[in-house]
Amino acid sequence: MNEITDNMSSDSISSKPLMLFNSMTRKLEAFTPVHEGEARVYTCGPTVYNYPHIGNMRAYVFADLLGRTLSWKGYKLTHVINITDVGHLTDDGDAGEDKLEKAAAERAQSIWDIARHYTEAYWEDIKALNIRQPAHWSIATDYVPQMIEYAKAIADKHCYELDSGLYFDVSTVADYGRLARAATEDGEGRIEAVEGKRNAADFAIWRKTPEGESRQMEWDSPWGKGAPGWHLECSVMSEALLGLPFDIHTGGIDHREIHHPNEIAQNQAHSGCDHSGAQFWMHNNFLIDRSGKMSKSSGEFLRLQLLIDKGIHPLAYRLMCMQAHYRSELEFSWDNLIAALTRLKRIVMGVERLQERLATAQDAKAPHPKIAEIRDQLNAAISNDLNSPPVIPLLEELLSLKKIDAAQRMDLLQEIDLLLGLNLGKLTRVDLRLPPKSVSISETEIEQKLDMRQQSKIAKDFAAADAIRDDLMAQGVELMDGDPLRWEWSIKI
Ligand code: AMP
Ligand code: ZN
């Protein structure tokens, strides 16, 4: 059910243009691929010095929705997500230390172990959120020789050397910073001065290991021992794996200010033309909490595992993301998340009922016009810059149309889920009843107590039935007699 095949896309789906918001022009533009029938997408991946927070994961849920949409529209998708295991400094400009070096020093661990541990943790979150595997996970440290060659190729015309490294001179390319636009001023304000830099926005593409020091991760280069700059990585890996220009480059909105303008400058230098390197630059907005943007460096942050420990299925978070347009800020609150979980439970129950109907379905019926109508609405929403929020009520409407042939409803349901990625049809109500870590009672014990309570009620021993209810309540289990969802019980979150 999770497989999207190229032949899924019928004419009516592919003939409607896919309009995407291009951060470069700040306009909606119709997607037309560089290579006929293909879609090549590069997504800036995580810096693996810590666990990803759920805000980071919003960036990958968005990239996944984009990839699923392109597949649904009939394009052969090649998606690359990189893993930054070297080069990302504590400030996106040129200030501070390498995030991984810093984490390794603080924890007295090998940088390679840190990178491996957090890469695996990130991949677990990718799986838990039902994000499809990209064609390539490109690991930055695997590409260092190519990065050195790339830097050599642009050094003479576009770079200069300082004691601290090889710097890119942004005045050597046309229209530097056009992606960031008005925000450029702010962006530059954040860049710490490095003595000898020709322009405030110049950035290191190779950082030399200071004299007399050694780093855990360093390589020989024509500019001395050192490590590549973060921006260089993405330019090298995207060009190596997708070719320039490719179709779409994605990332969080913060990348619009420094990281992506710097990638673009390098792409221009290396290709020798003014093309930015990608047809579309797309950015998801932030997941915020009341105090502002969620960040890893602020110490306390929300990991997907924390949600799971509290008994909230990760796909409830995915649904919460789908309930907002990717370009809107999304405010995190536990209430919103619990509301998304309840909504997901209702959807899953609707799917279970549909599966029951399908099992007893009669002969095939003529195509029902309402199915085509919903499908058109789905196509209209998703083709409008991946407008996912209206898709969820469409799904709910489809589940409520009990008079319409189950097989036709199931086909469309599967198609909707190919886009939303909620794993419908496989996800069960038992999956959604994750016990919070703090609760020690098992499902079997709960079910046994419910049986006993049922017996007490039959015997009209209401005092015993109430005692069981109170006992369960004390253990965090809430009974929901007459619950319209027929959920019977849930564990308090
Ligand atoms: P990092 O690991 O810091 O390089 O970030 C990984 C991805 O998460 C990047 O695309 C960031 O732009 C994105 N990102 C960071 N914070 C947030 C947030 N609060 N909400 C959404 N995306 C974010
Ligand atoms: Zn990047």
Image (cartoon, rainbow, N blue to C red):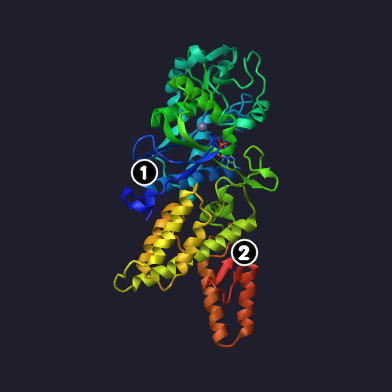
Q: Which residue is the extreme one toward the left?
A: 363
> Does the rendering let one see residue 87?
no
Which callout, 2 or 1, points at the residue further toward the start of the chain? 1
422 versus 147 height, above or below: below
User: In the image, which disc is placed on residue 75?
Assistant: 1
Residue 468, image quadrant: bottom right
In the rendered image, residue 252, in percent from the top left (x then y), is placed at 56, 39
Q: Nearer the viewer, residue 36 or 191?
A: 36
* Residue shown at 60% from the left, 33% from the top: 107
Q: Nearer the viewer, residue 78 or 441?
A: 78
Instruction: Give the spatial CA distance, label 2 vs label 1.
Output: 44 Å
**Mark 2: which secondary structure?**
loop
Q: 98 left or right of 396?
A: right
Label 1: few (<14), some (14–19) or many (≥20) C-alpha neighbours in 10 Å: many
Badge 2 crowding class, 10 Å Cα cut-off, few under 14, some 14 to 19, many 20 or more, is: some
Q: Residue at x 49, y 43 (%)?
A: 20
Q: Where is residue 491 drawn, in percent x and y? A: 59, 65
Q: Position of residue 161 (x, y in %)?
A: 56, 12
**Residue depth check, mark 2 versus mark 1: number of the one nearer the observer:** 1
Q: Which residue is mark 2?
A: 492
Q: Quadrant of ligand 1?
A: top right
In this view, which residue lies farthest toward the right?
A: 291
Q: Amino acid at mark 1?
A: Tyr
Q: Nearer the viewer, residue 164 or 444?
A: 164
In the rendered view, tell whether residue 74 sits above or below residue 208: below
Give the x, y percent position of residue 434: 53, 60
Label 1 element class: loop
In the picture, which quadrant includes the N terminus? bottom left
Contact between marks 2 and 1 (CB within 8 A): the answer is: no
Q: Which mark is residue 319?
A: none
Disc 2 marks which amino acid?
Answer: Lys
**Quarter containing the C terminus:** bottom right
